[in-house]
């Protein structure tokens, strides 16, 4: 495939249901991809229901954040993202190890330290040694990414969004978020800066459409400062169909939605639907126009 | 001045007041002479002061059975001579400015981290480092408007024990102690040239006004966690004396990035400046701790956009982290190009293997403190720990070195204090001057002198039963 660019239509629908009507809610949404490496966002829209004007800023980790304040009474809040994203197959680069002194005064040190959801504990250090011995090279990093899906089962519902690495290891099963956290703990323990990436998995090979959830993987940084994507759920480098949304130290930094509301309602887990389709160049133009029209319609309501 | 003989009633070991050769230290000469002549006055003065505190509800601590405890007060003032004070003043000005530069740097270019002056591993793992505010420039580029820097005297030399730049407390107790003593012992002020401290609140108000988005009609609010906070009395007093409103988080609401306060009558008022006594990670549940009930969602965005000012600015906790304290002298050299005028107590960074091994090997001489606690809780003196306790302590340190700080145990100077039974005894004291930072630092002459609860202990925290004294700075 080489550097051929592929274009994807992304439709990302989030629904939050409240048990009672609430008068005011504040929401932070991280659902807009940022151009990086081979990935470009050609069109993007974020609509909410009830309608509100989102305001965006770039956060500490370089991600887009939209603030959406809803001040009309609502018992349900929806976010609809429509985006057209172009990507090409990233180079499968091999990374060189950091010298400890080199990392000590480098800002990327932050990604080699423990973070709230990725503690560096004896259990993951022991696991690294058992798998790789004293080898802390990139080969060992790669072998670790490949080994995680062989050692652990991917079971939807085995864990929740709040589950820890210990929960994953105790149950032996989890989802992409858990696998990514485990991978981060293992490689950080071996001295590599590594970050958590949230995104989507688009169709690959003969597939034209994928439907389901969002995805998560990791990026590891080499001594030259370059980052490489590794997917510990699939045990491989990331490809053109890995569409990157946001990156941070762990899931807590990139959660697609964080919100607060005034009221007595109980919050429920958001329902998320994602649909990603491969597009022809003609389709790209159609969607771009359509998005613009719908955005205007909502503003006029 | 001629050296006086120590009267028999002055206790030995009170090195804060008496030289090793037995002569009274000069700043204390007039005061101790009066004390010696009329020792019977002291219980009366203490009683008078306590009654005065009770009448004004000067409390420290969380209410039990409906009433918070009165702050314990010792009637014999702590006296600092004019030239000693000049040293402290210059040193703490220097230190406060360097700490402010450091906070500014952490949320800006992070030069000190790249240049290896302060280890990035400590900043990036500090609970005081708030990633959501990196890149923000507060009004007048000042972060630490109020700093409370704890100073101790060890064998005649001052050292800094701790920096408080999040929500330093204690100034109200210093102000009230002075008022009480002026009322019940006016004769002492007639014979000693004591510098006045009552313009502290005016100075603080002026700073708050200057950072306001609308300085000409600034509405200033003192944000308190509420009556269950140990320093609630102080929040109330500062609000009253500055003509500010005292608010709790649930009274604040953010709309269109402006901050408003709903008062109990239902009136709505825009707020320009918040003097916050709530730790910054509790300020905005949308950005920081989602469980917080102490702040208001959206308030950080309002600050980011310059619609409300904060003192201290959110994020100053990174300079207040006890694990970063060992690097403050290096900050002074780096940012100011000056030598620190008052040094740290020798302190070890336990995240560094070599320093950690040194501490474990010399545990007898060390005091171990958890980095994220205040109020003197969970402090361990290696000297006093039994074998089992030591093993446990070392295990706790090895398991979480970032959570601990080791300082060499220092012998705090002891001042003469009045015992319950009317006798005198020496007790350890420290000093927390309050530095206000605007264009240049201003320090209220004196500060809060804290006194240990008994002659044996070296912990002076109010939460540990310690009390306070009035603190005098002499003008000559």
Image (cartoon, helix red, strand yellow):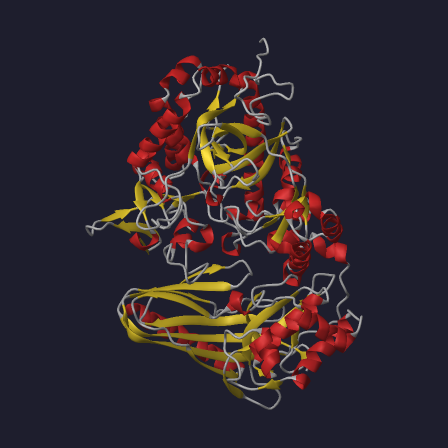
| Residue A68 placement: quadrant | bottom left
**Farthest residue toward the left?**
B265
**Farthest residue toward the right?**
A134
Q: Is there any visible trace of residue A53 in the rendered image? A: no
Q: Position of residue A106 (x, y in %)?
A: 68, 54
**Farthest residue toward the top?**
B2
The vertical placement of A127 against A258, above or below, is below
Task: Return the residue nearer the eye: B336 or B205.
Answer: B205
Q: Position of residue B372 (x, y in %)?
A: 55, 52
The vertical placement of B404 against A31, above or below, is above
Task: Give the residue at x 73% y 67%.
Answer: A190
Q: Is there any visible trace of residue A147 in the rendered image? A: yes
Task: Return the residue nearer the eye: A82 or A238.
Answer: A238
Q: Quadrant of the N terminus of chain B?
A: top right
The vertical placement of B468 against A103, above or below, is above
Q: Position of residue A191 (x, y in %)?
A: 72, 64
Left or right of A66: which side holds B226?
Answer: left
Task: Give the residue at x 65% y 40%.
Answer: B409
Task: Return the residue nearer the eye: A179 or B357.
Answer: B357
Tally the numbered discs.
Answer: 0
Q: Position of residue A147 (x, y in %)?
A: 70, 81
Left or right of B222: which side holds A170?
Answer: right
């Amino acid at each position: 495939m080489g550097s051929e660019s592929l274009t994807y239509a992304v439709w990302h629908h989030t629904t939050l249901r409240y048990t009672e009507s609430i008068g005011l809610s504040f929401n932070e949404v991280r659902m807009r991809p940022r151009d990086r490496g081979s990935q470009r966002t050609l069109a993007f829209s974020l609509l909410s229901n009830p309608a509100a004007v989102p305001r965006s800023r770039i956060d500490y980790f370089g991600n887009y954040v939209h603030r959406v304040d809803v001040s009309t009474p609502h018992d349900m809040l929806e976010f609809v993202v429509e985006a057209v994203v172009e990507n090409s197959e990233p180079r499968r680069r091999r990374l060189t190890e950091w010298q400890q002194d080199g990392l000590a005064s480098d800002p990327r040190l932050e990604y080699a330290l423990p973070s709230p959801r990725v503690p560096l504990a004896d259990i993951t250090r022991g696991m690294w040694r058992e798998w790789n011995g004293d080898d802390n090279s990139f080969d060992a990093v790669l072998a670790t990414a490949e080994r995680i899906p062989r050692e652990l089962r991917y079971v939807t519902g085995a864990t929740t969004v709040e589950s820890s690495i210990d929960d994953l290891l105790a149950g032996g099963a989890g989802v992409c978020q858990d696998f990514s956290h485990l991978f981060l703990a293992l490689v950080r323990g071996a001295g590599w800066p590594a970050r958590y990436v949230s995104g989507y998995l688009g169709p690959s090979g003969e597939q034209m459409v994928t439907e389901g959830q969002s995805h998560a993987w990791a990026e590891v940084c080499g001594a030259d400062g370059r980052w490489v994507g590794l997917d510990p759920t699939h045990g491989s480098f990331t490809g053109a169909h890995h569409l990157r949304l946001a990156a941070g130290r762990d899931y807590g930094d990139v959660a697609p939605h964080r919100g607060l509301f005034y009221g007595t309602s109980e919050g429920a887990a958001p329902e998320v639907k994602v649909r990603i389709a491969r597009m022809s160049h003609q389709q790209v133009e159609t969607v771009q126009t359509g998005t613009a029209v719908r955005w205007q319609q909502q503003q006029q309501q | 001045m001629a050296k006086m003989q120590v009267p028999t009633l002055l206790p030995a070991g009170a090195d804060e007041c008496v030289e090793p050769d037995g002569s009274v230290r000069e700043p204390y000469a007039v005061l101790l002479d009066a004390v010696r002549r009329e020792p019977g006055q002291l219980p009366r003065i203490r009683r008078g002061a306590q009654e005065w505190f009770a009448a004004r509800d000067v409390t420290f601590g969380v209410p039990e059975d409906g009433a918070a405890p009165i702050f314990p007060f010792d009637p014999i003032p702590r006296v600092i001579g004019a030239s000693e004070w000049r040293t402290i003043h210059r040193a703490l000005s220097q230190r406060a400015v360097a700490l402010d530069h450091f906070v500014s740097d952490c949320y800006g270019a992070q030069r000190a981290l790249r240049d290896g002056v302060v280890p990035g591993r400590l900043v990036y793992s500090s609970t005081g480092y708030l990633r959501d505010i990196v890149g923000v420039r507060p009004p007048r580029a000042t972060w630490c408007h109020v700093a409370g820097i704890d100073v101790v005297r060890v064998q005649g030399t001052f050292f800094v024990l701790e920096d408080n730049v999040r929500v330093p407390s204690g100034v109200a107790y210093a102000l009230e102690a002075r008022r009480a003593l002026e009322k019940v012992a006016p004769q002492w002020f007639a014979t000693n040239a004591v510098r006045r401290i009552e313009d502290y609140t005016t100075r603080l108000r002026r700073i708050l006004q200057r950072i306001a988005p609308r300085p000409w009609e600034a509405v200033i609010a003192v944000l308190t966690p509420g009556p269950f906070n140990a320093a609630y009395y102080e929040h109330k007093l500062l609000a009253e004396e500055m003509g500010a409103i005292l608010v709790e988080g649930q009274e604040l609401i953010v709309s269109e990035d402006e901050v408003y306060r709903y008062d109990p009558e239902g009136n709505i008022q825009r707020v320009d400046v918040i003097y916050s006594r709530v730790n910054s990670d509790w300020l905005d549940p949308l950005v920081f701790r989602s469980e917080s009930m102490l702040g208001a969602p959206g308030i950080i965005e309002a600050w980011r956009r310059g619609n409300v000012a904060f003192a201290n600015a959110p994020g100053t906790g990174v300079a207040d982290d006890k694990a970063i304290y060992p690097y403050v002298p290096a900050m002074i050299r780096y940012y100011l190009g000056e030598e620190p005028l008052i040094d740290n107590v020798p302190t070890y960074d336990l995240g560094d293997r070599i320093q950690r091994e040194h501490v474990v090997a010399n545990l007898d001489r060390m005091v171990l403190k958890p980095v994220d606690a205040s109020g003197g809780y969970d402090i361990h003196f290696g000297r006093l720990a039994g074998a089992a306790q030591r093993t446990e302590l070392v295990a706790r340190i090895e398991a979480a070195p970032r959570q601990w700080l080791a300082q060499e145990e220092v012998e705090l100077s002891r001042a003469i204090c009045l015992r319950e039974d009317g006798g005198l005894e020496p007790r350890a004291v420290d000093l927390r001057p309050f530095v206000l930072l605007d264009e240049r630092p201003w320090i209220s002459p004196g500060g809060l002198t804290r006194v240990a609860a008994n002659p044996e202990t070296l912990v002076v925290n109010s939460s540990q039963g310690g009390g306070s004294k009035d603190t005098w700075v002499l003008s000559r």
